[in-house]
């Protein structure tokens, strides 16, 4: 699974993207693995939305190895 | 309805024409959102924008389509800058053609509200005049 980080989340992870091995997982599984890899992300979990293949997904989403998952912190365009 | 979406790292043109194909248009509404010279109480020279480009374009198109079901218009052009945008320049441009002004204004207001909630674009950092000058030297 390809994970993408934006804005201040990149300052936490020190990278714009990473590959996360593992098969089918839900949002809780994904966050557990993310926080394991980058503990600093836990602070932002409540305010970050997840997008799967460029679409926002809810807490009931499931992810596979082939997905591109983006962590979307609060936006500030315009 | 025709929709044009663009993310660009170059300045938005000072003049953008209304669509000539919009036969029946009685209103051409434009909005430019400019970078202000202050951010969080401090004087700045520029803002740096970052986007998740494929999703930002998809979201903008989705929002416009959704809003247009209630505020039918003929044409929408949305351009957002990414990268460094100096103070005074437009970070965003919206142009909307409608049969009447009411739906064009309503679509514009609705779109800007939704953009600030859902479109994955971020003000990455504010730059001082010194930081901006250093970037230009490099």
Image (cartoon, coloured by chain):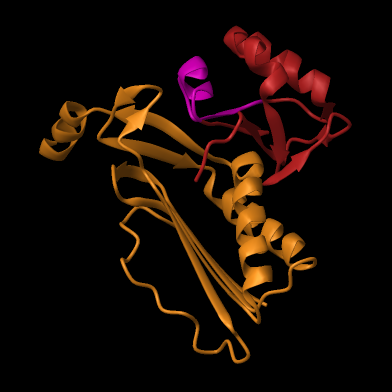
Going 76% across and 61% down the picture, which residue do you hit? B66
Q: Up-down: is B102 above or below B41? A: below
Residue B69 or residue A26, whichever sits in front: B69
Q: Is residue B99 left or right of residue B15?
A: right
Display colour for chain A? red
Going 34% across and 71% down the picture, which residue do you hit? B15
Task: Point out the stretch of residues depicted in magenta.
Answer: A7-20
Chain that is orange in the image: B
Q: Position of residue B71 (x, y in %)?
A: 74, 68
Q: Is residue A48 left or right of residue B21?
A: right
Q: Is residue A50 left or right of residue B43?
A: right
Residue B4 or residue B46, whichever sits in front: B46
Going 60% across and 92% down the picture, which residue do you hit? B23
Q: Is residue A40 left or right of residue A68?
A: left
Q: Quadrant of the C terminus of chain B?
A: top left
Q: Position of residue B35 (x, y in %)?
A: 36, 43
Give residue A60's quadrant in the image: top right
Q: Position of residue B131 (x, y in %)?
A: 20, 28
Q: Position of residue B62 (x, y in %)?
A: 70, 58
Q: Up-down: is B125 above or below B99? A: above
Q: Up-down: is B37 above or below A35? A: below
Outermost left residue: B137
Q: Quadrant of the N terminus of chain B?
A: bottom right
Going 23% across and 27% down the picture, which residue do you hit? B128
- Magenta-colored stretch includes residue B63: no
């Amino acid at each position: 699974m390809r994970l993408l980080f934006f804005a201040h989340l990149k300052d936490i992870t020190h990278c714009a993207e990473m590959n996360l091995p593992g098969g089918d997982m839900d949002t809780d599984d994904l966050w557990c693995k993310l926080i394991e890899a980058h503990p600093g992300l836990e602070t932002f979990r409540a305010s970050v939305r997840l997008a799967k293949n460029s679409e926002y997904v809810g807490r009931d989403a499931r992810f596979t190895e082939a997905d591109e998952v983006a962590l979307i912190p609060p936006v500030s365009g315009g | 309805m025709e929709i044009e979406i663009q993310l660009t790292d170059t300045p938005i043109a000072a003049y953008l024409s209304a669509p000539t194909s919009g036969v029946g248009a009685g209103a051409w509404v434009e909005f430019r959102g400019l970078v202000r010279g202050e951010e969080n109480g401090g004087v700045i020279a520029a803002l740096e924008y970052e986007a998740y480009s494929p999703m930002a374009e998809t979201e903008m198109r989705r929002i416009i389509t959704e809003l247009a079901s209630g505020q039918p218009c003929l044409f929408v052009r949305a351009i957002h800058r990414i990268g460094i945008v100096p103070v005074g320049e437009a970070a965003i441009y919206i142009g909307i053609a409608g049969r009447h002004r009411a739906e064009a204004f309503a679509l514009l207001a609705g779109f800007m509200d939704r953009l600030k909630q859902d479109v994955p674009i971020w003000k990455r950092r504010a730059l001082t005049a010194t930081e901006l000058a250093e970037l230009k030297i490099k």
